[in-house]
Image (tube, rainbow, N blue to C red):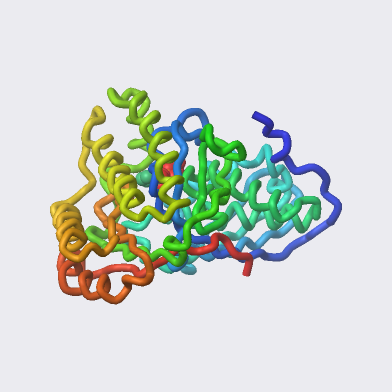
Amino acid sequence: MDLKKFKTRNIYNEIEDGSITCKSPSNIALIKYWGKKDIQIPLNPSISFTLDNCNTTTTLTYQKKSTNDISFELFFDGNSKEEFEPKISQFFNRVIEYVPFLNSYHFKIDTTNTFPHSSGIASSASGMSALATCVVELEQKLSQEMSLNEIRRKASFLSRLGSGSACRSIEGPMVLWGKHSSIKESSDIYGIKLPIEINQVYNNYQDTILIVEKGQKLVSSSVGHELMNNHDFKTQRFIQASNRLTQIISALESGDLMGFIKIVELEALTLHAMMMSSDPYFILMRPNTLKIINKVWEFRKSTSIPVCFTLDAGANVHILYPKTFQKPIDNFIKKELLKYCQDGQFIADCVGEGVKII
Ligand code: 2P0
């Protein structure tokens, strides 16, 4: 693997201080990443929709210093957040060999999310991709050597070192991360905009996120990934994910919504089946997660509206559908599903275009 191209080359500009602000979205995987090796190398390729409304805005303020070490302070919604510091520290330590100029600055990181921290929506994808993009923008100010494509690649590459799924948040509307035989540009070390002609039925796809359970989940994704290493179904699961990726690409190109729905729901249930059959085993779905799934199936059967669900590593349910069906689905959600959400909470989101410099 050629990692040299991700190292900072020349620094031309002397910059004392300043700030950079980036806004980066979360993403929802359709083919799931569950299992990794080494430093954030996925054991199977994954595909995601980039989201739009669930995002993190991060301002990175930098000030030149004389010592040569990593130095930062972190503020979340204006308050100092020590509990998030280890994850940021780990990020800086992993990326420093690619962006050694970070050692010459003290950083203040100010971050806010559009979604509530305790809503059960993972903030690592949007948070880490926003921070990584700020870092790459600073490099560009110092060196002015990268093309837009190189900036995106490097932002995705560094994001991955912070959190695997974060590397899928740089671009939109769909991103592929992980080597797959049918797409030669695909890579294990960064995400790429899915290089296929996506059928227009997927334009402006909607994702209503039903908050079944707020708060911290009982088992972290890192532990879940780790448990795949000795999982009984490991070999078959990674082959299956690659095969499903081939199938979903075909459904995305042809506009075969029923084929798309089948793979998306299978992937969601397989992800949770992996958790339920690992050692130790665990369940992140809640009774209301299952009630919602059954209601979605009943509604789809009785109306033939192409709505489906997917799940993240938690109890919340993402309801996915084409924009054309917004009205009947809004009614369905309001009448039949919100009662299963904690405090009736949900987030109306849709596919988006990735990170933005503000
Ligand atoms: C995904 N998830 O593809 C899968 C499906 C959750 C369910 O990637 O350890 O926070 O930082 O690489 O990216 C969540 O795991 O894990 C995740 P790390 P990450 O979106």
| The quarter of the picture showing ligand 1 | top left
> Residue at the spot x=53%, y=61% of the render?
24
Horizontally, is 134 left or right of 35 in the view?
right
Residue at image location 43% in from the left, 34% down from the top: 242
Choose between 157 and 106: the one closer to the eye: 157
Where is residue 69? Give x, y as percent.
Answer: 67, 43
Q: Residue visible at 25% across and 30% down?
A: 278
Residue 110 appears anywhere in the view:
no
- 238 left or right of 25 in image: left
Quadrant (top left, top right, bottom left, bottom right) of the C terminus = bottom right
Q: Nearer the viewer, residue 45 or 343?
A: 45
* Residue 294: x %, y % from top left: 15, 55
Q: How many numbered marks appear?
A: 0
Q: Is residue 100 above or below residue 119?
A: above
Q: Quadrant of residue 137?
A: bottom right
Which residue lies at the image location 45% right of the left edge and 54% below the top edge?
Answer: 82
Q: Can you give x and y, in whole percent of width and height, for residue 272 in the image?
A: 26, 41
Closer to the camera in the image, 224 or 97: 224
Relative depth, front residue between 67 and 180: 180
Which corner quadrant holds the N terminus?
A: top right
Q: Is residue 315 visible?
A: yes
Q: Percent from the top left, x then y, of residue 291?
A: 14, 57
